[in-house]
Amino acid sequence: MKKKIAKIPKFKNYAEEAEWWDTHSLADYWDSWTPVKLIYKPNKKEDTLAVRLDTDLKKQVSALATSQGLSPSTLVRMWMVEHVRAAVKKDFSP
């Protein structure tokens, strides 16, 4: 026997919706969704910079990244952003 599933209500805000979904399962509503076509067009331009690392340094970076659940390139990119922002802030501070 199937259990009766409540209709998804209209929500006043995201907090109200989040609270409702905390007590309901998406699996119960799987057949009521309408598929949508999503096209992702990133608006950021990115470029690549190749950096040579010695083997030991690459292993250390990889180990640190893995311990944080990141890829080595993501961790290094994060470090670069932090250091460049700090350097720019330092150079342009009154």
Image (cartoon, grey):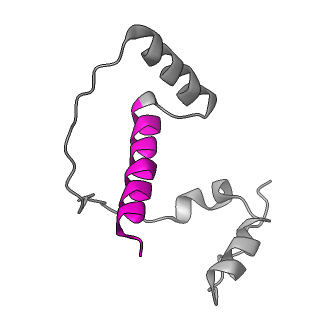
Q: Residue at 43% of width from left, 38% of height from top? A: 74
Q: Residue at 36% of width from left, 60% of height from top? A: 88
Would residue 35 be seen by someone viewing this image from the given angle? no
34 or 75, which lies in front? 75
Would residue 37 be seen by someone viewing this image from the given angle? yes
Furthest-top residue in this view: 55
93 relative to 24 in the view: left or right: left
Q: Look at the image and say whether residue 55 sits in the magenta stretch.
A: no
51 relative to 2 in the view: left or right: left
Q: Position of residue 83 (x, y in %)?
A: 43, 48
Q: Quadrant of the C terminus?
A: bottom left
Q: On screen, 55 above or below 75?
A: above
Q: On screen, 37 above or below 50?
A: below
Q: Look at the image and say whether residue 81 sits in the magenta stretch.
A: yes
Furthest-front residue in this view: 94
Predominant secondary structure, magenta span:
helix
Q: Position of residue 27 (x, y in %)?
A: 65, 53
Q: Residue at 80% of width from left, 65% of height from top? A: 23
Q: Which residues are magenta?
A: 73-94
Q: Residue at 62% of width from left, 62% of height from top? A: 29
Q: Position of residue 15 (x, y in %)?
A: 69, 79
Furthest-bottom residue in this view: 12
